[in-house]
Image (spheres, grey):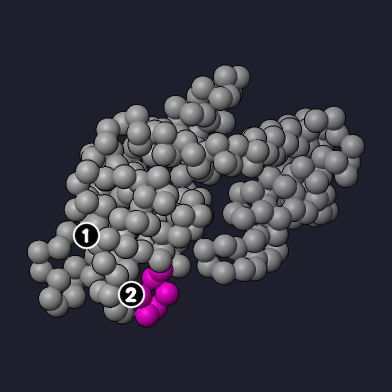
Amino acid sequence: MNSSKTQAELILWAERNGLVFSDENLLRQAVTHRSLVNEAGSVGQADNQRLEFLGDAIVDFIVADWLFRRYADAQEGELTGLRAEIVRTQGLAAYANEIGLGRVLRLGRGEAANGGRARAANLCDAFEALVGALYLDRGLEPTRTWVLRFLERHTAEIDSQRANKDAKSMLQEYTQAVLRVTPSYVIVSEAGLEHDKTFCAQVLVGDQVWGEGKGHSKQLAEQAAASAAIERHHLQA
């Protein structure tokens, strides 16, 4: 957010996205990048790094709790993998883009000029900082409710990720048991903007391509390729 933006505009943006703060300074700090603080004339302002540290842990907890309750039959390894996929930098940056967080980031001039509002790391950090600020201001339950809005909107996608992970495991179990070969994966192409890339992966069994798939992360592309291989070779899912 540049200097022409007012605190009132920031508060209005927050309210539109379900974020109501008693301490508006926490909100302001959550969207303040260190580049602004490092600039001359920004003495006395606090950046969002401490809030990001706190928010990171809170997001991990809320996501883990949600996954644990939703997938009662999932084992630790699967739950860990699903959580890692959700809370990765690109995943949380996508959530930040849904609420237009980049538009209200308070960046230094250099960072803003170099595409800082679209940089996945900045968006992810600010999203986690918002969660940390909301927790300090409102407590755990309102914070949980706000984060769950994103998870619930993406439930079908997360369910699909889980199915694809199962497909990848199934393919490996089949090829190792029947062919004594472990599948390998290669990313053959990637396209799109830095914060919204699409990857294309192939799964190889030996030197043969068994399947190809696309996804918004390398992991998802590999999982889609495994699903394609299962369908192509008529393996029982």
> Residue at coordinates 59% horizontally, 54% vertically from top-left?
217
The percent position of residue 160, horizontal first and vertical second, equals 68, 39
- Where is residue 189, by image quadrant? bottom right
Asked whether 73 or 196 is in front, the reply is 196
Mark 2 neighbour density, 10 Å: few (under 14) some (14–19) many (20 or more):
some
Query: Disc 1 vs disc 2: Cβ atoms closer than 8 Å?
Result: no
Q: Which residue appears farthest toward the left when viewing the image? A: 44
Mark 1 neighbour density, 10 Å: few (under 14) some (14–19) many (20 or more):
many
Q: Which residue appears farthest toward the top when viewing the image? A: 72
**Amino acid type at image mark 2:** Glu
Asked whether 124 or 85 is in front, the reply is 124
Q: Is residue 49 left or right of residue 171?
A: left
Q: Is residue 108 above or below residue 143?
A: below
- Where is residue 9, by image quadrant? bottom left
The percent position of residue 15, horizontal first and vertical second, equals 36, 50
**Amino acid type at image mark 1:** Asp
Task: Answer yes or no: is residue 208 visible.
Answer: yes
The percent position of residue 71, horizontal first and vertical second, equals 58, 24
- The residue singled out by tag 2 in the image is 111
Whichever of labels 1 and 2 marks the residue nearer the N terminus, that label is 1
- Where is residue 82, by image quadrant? top right
Give the number of marks: 2
Q: Is residue 231 left or right of residue 67?
A: right
Q: Give the residues in magenta.
A: 111-117
> Residue at coordinates 57% horizontally, 62% vertically from top-left?
196
- The residue singled out by tag 1 in the image is 47
Q: Is residue 233 above or below residue 111?
A: above
